[in-house]
Image: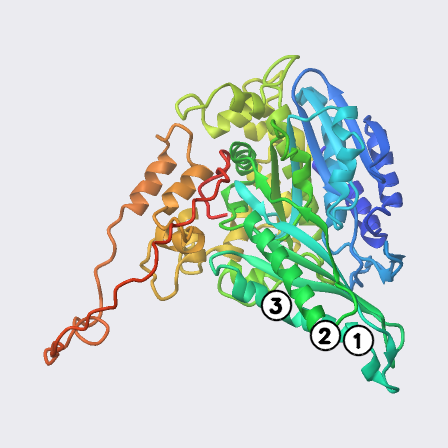
């Protein structure tokens, strides 16, 4: 069996090579060839050229579910400024002919390296699982059309429809941390192209004879920023960015047209439609105000849907990750991220029977960078560390890759893990489809034991199983905690345990013994109301404006509660949320608390309000869109 420690040097070398040689979207020829060669050596049936430069590897290993593991391969048109010894100096040409530097600033080099490492690891440990593994290396994620291109090229028709689709995305959290979220985890993205027409002229000789499209474009860019500020409900999240502006060839010439590309992000389909309509209105109005000779062209170039994780499968995968990494290194995101991804297309969202999928975030920020980042809370630090799409984005290479290989392998084994003997695996899919598992039937540890246990050692625990799959050969006696030390411990503090790492990063200095619940209080609690409960905090973060009566208890039930409702965790949450509020403090009289003794009631006759006028107005009907059955009762 190939172990993580044995395969890691090869994966690390592969990652460094990819980082040094990035390729733009739909130009991933070198990368796809390297992926295909690795998969072929690992025993996969490999097909290239799917959807352009996509790669598919199939490994059949008896009866069982089909699990699709996906990565993205493309890089960004960005000049790298990390100062790394293997920093990219590559240059290329975009689809519209612009020469540009190229950088792996979104972590797709790590995605790809972790995928081939996982594929190799699972191929060499086939006695531990049963089913079919489908490995997909996707082109064109940055252009948000690579997944659709592979599906349009017959991905599922040619290679089979998967039972579950899994992927991970590099995030700005501390390196080695795994972040899950049931329901919406990433927002939707819309890209709009705008072509503005003018009349050419000379800037110094009769400029009044022309219509300058650059001036029109400048007015449009400024006015567009008012859409989010004045046309989107403050309770909704929306972002609008004008990222492409092109016009003219010479400083003193008035060009005949200008071109803009505008990107919007939001967490609601209705908001996306509202923003698009506003963009179209503003663009046409500004052009008309400047007497443009033609109406501008407004085109929706592409739109991706929300990434909406299947709630039950998210719980299954996150439970497996917690059993291996430990609670300190696996968190639940309180809110979605606004970034977009076309990964949701693999779930066939418009199909009568969509394919369930789970995406999680893989932390990549070096621990020293995280510790040095300003801010008292993780939310403050997230705003300070270099994140995805930054020219200074430099993941912690070893901690990120080791955790990524382990997380993707464990995710696959959640569904492929064989319980005993040859034949069909008892997977997370089978468990979810057949029945709901109650607390008294099996614990989380027993679930993972059934998924990952060796056939010849039925008495082995989950910890021993994962040692057999992922631990170092020379340290078979090491526990799961020791594994994580080897995977993620800081080089200068090798003796620190995984728990100590996370204490140093996230725990409150004065309450080292606090539980995960206390950690979340420390992360999210209001500074001025230290006695406020976690329920109040989470209400402030997640409550729907139109459904103010929903409590954190309902949110946490959908994310974490056992299906049968009698689990200890739910009881603990109920006890936490039922605590009486603290007694009132402060003065009992004054302008903020009540009238002073000298207060005089108003005098004189009362003034009657005028009667209402006009016919009654009916309230608008509620939206027809039904809630998703697999999504927790979040606002998004």
- Can you see residue 431? yes
In the figure, is residue 231 to the left or right of 365?
A: left
The image shows residue 66 at horizontal and vertical percentages of: 68, 24
The residue that disc 1 covers is 211
In the figure, is residue 346 to the left or right of 481?
A: right
Marks 1 and 3 in Cβ contact (< 8 Å): no
Marks 2 and 1 in Cβ contact (< 8 Å): yes
| Residue lying at 80% horizontally and 32% vertically, measured from the top left | 56
Count of labels shown?
A: 3
The residue that disc 3 covers is 225
Q: Earlier in the sequence, mark 2 or mark 1?
A: 1
Numbered tag placed on residue 571 in the rendering: none
> Under tag 2, what secondary structure?
loop
Q: Report crowding for label 2: few under 14, some 14 to 19, many 20 or more residues within 10 A (C-alpha).
A: some
Q: Report crowding for label 3: few under 14, some 14 to 19, many 20 or more residues within 10 A (C-alpha).
A: some
Colouring used for the render: rainbow
The residue that disc 2 covers is 290
Q: Between tags 2 and 3, which lies in front? A: 2
Which is nearer the eye, 2 or 34?
Answer: 34
> Under tag 3, what secondary structure?
helix
Q: Is residue 439 above or below residue 386?
A: above
In the figure, is residue 9 to the left or right of 525?
A: right
Q: Report crowding for label 1: few under 14, some 14 to 19, many 20 or more residues within 10 A (C-alpha).
A: many
Q: Residue furthest front?
A: 614
The image shows residue 15 at horizontal and vertical percentages of: 79, 47
Q: Between tags 1 and 3, which lies in front? A: 1
């Amino acid at each position: 069996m190939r172990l993580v420690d044995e395969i890691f040097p090869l994966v690390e070398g592969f990652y460094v090579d990819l980082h040094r040689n990035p390729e733009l979207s739909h130009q991933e020829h070198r990368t796809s060839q390297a992926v295909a060669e690795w998969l072929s050596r690992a025993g996969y049936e490999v097909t290239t050229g799917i959807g352009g430069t996509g790669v598919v590897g199939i490994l059949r290993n008896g009866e069982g579910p089909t699990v699709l593991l996906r990565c993205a391969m493309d890089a960004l048109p960005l000049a790298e400024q990390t100062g790394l010894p293997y920093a990219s100096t590559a240059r290329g040409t975009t689809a519209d002919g612009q020469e540009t530097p190229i950088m792996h600033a979104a972590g797709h080099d790590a995605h790809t390296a972790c995928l081939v490492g996982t594929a190799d690891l699972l191929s060499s440990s086939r006695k531990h699982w049963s089913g079919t593994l489908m490995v997909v290396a996707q082109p064109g994620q940055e252009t948000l059309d690579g997944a659709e291109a592979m599906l349009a090229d017959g991905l599922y028709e040619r290679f089979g429809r998967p039972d579950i689709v899994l992927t991970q995305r590099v995030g700005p959290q501390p390196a080695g941390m795994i972040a899950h979220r049931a329901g919406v985890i990433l927002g939707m993205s819309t890209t709009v192209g705008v072509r503005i027409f003018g009349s050419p002229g000379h800037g110094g000789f009769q400029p009044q004879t022309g219509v300058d499209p650059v001036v029109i474009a400048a007015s449009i860019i400024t006015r567009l920023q008012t859409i989010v500020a004045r046309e989107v409900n403050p309770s909704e999240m929306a972002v609008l960015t004008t990222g492409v502006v092109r016009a003219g060839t010479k400083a003193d010439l008035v060009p005949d047209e200008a071109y803009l590309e505008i990107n919007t992000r939001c967490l609601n389909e209705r908001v996306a439609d509202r923003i698009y309509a506003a963009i179209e209105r503003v663009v046409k109005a500004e052009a008309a105000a400047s007497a443009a000779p033609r109406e501008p062209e407004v085109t929706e170039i592409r739109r991706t849907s929300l990434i909406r994780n299947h709630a039950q499968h998210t719980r299954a995968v996150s439970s497996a990750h917690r059993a291996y990494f430990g609670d300190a290194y696996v968190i639940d995101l309180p809110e979605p991220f606004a970034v977009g991804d076309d990964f949701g297309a693999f779930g066939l969202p418009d199909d009568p029977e969509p394919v369930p999928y789970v995406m999680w975030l893989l932390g990549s920020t070096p621990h020293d960078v995280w510790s040095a980042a300003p801010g008292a809370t993780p939310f403050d630090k997230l705003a300070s560390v270099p994140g995805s799409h930054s020219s200074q984005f430099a993941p912690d290479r070893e901690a990120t890759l080791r955790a990524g290989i382990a997380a993707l392998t464990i995710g696959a084994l959640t569904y492929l893990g064989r319980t005993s003997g040859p034949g069909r695996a008892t997977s997370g899919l089978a468990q979810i489809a057949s029945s709901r598992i109650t607390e008294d039937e099996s614990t989380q540890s027993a679930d993972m034991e059934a998924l990952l246990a060796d056939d010849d050692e039925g008495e082995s625990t989950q910890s021993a199983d994962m040692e057999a799959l992922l631990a170092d050969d020379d340290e078979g006696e090491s526990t799961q905690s020791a594994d994580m030390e080897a995977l993620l411990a800081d080089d200068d503090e090798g003796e620190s345990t995984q728990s100590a790492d996370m204490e140093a990063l996230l725990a409150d200095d004065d309450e080292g013994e606090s539980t995960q619940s206390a950690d979340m209080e420390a992360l999210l609690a209001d500074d001025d109301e230290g006695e406020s409960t976690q329920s109040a905090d989470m209400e402030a973060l997640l409550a729907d404006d139109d459904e103010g009566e929903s409590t954190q208890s309902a949110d946490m039930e959908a994310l974490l509660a056992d299906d049968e409702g009698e689990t200890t965790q739910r009881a603990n949450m109920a006890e936490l949320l039922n605590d009486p509020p603290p007694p009132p403090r402060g003065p009992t009289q004054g302008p903020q608390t009540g009238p002073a003794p000298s207060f005089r009631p108003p005098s004189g006759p009362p003034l009657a309000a005028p009667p209402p006028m006009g016919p009654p107005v009916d309230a608008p009907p509620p939206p027809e869109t039904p809630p998703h059955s697999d999504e927790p009762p979040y606002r998004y």
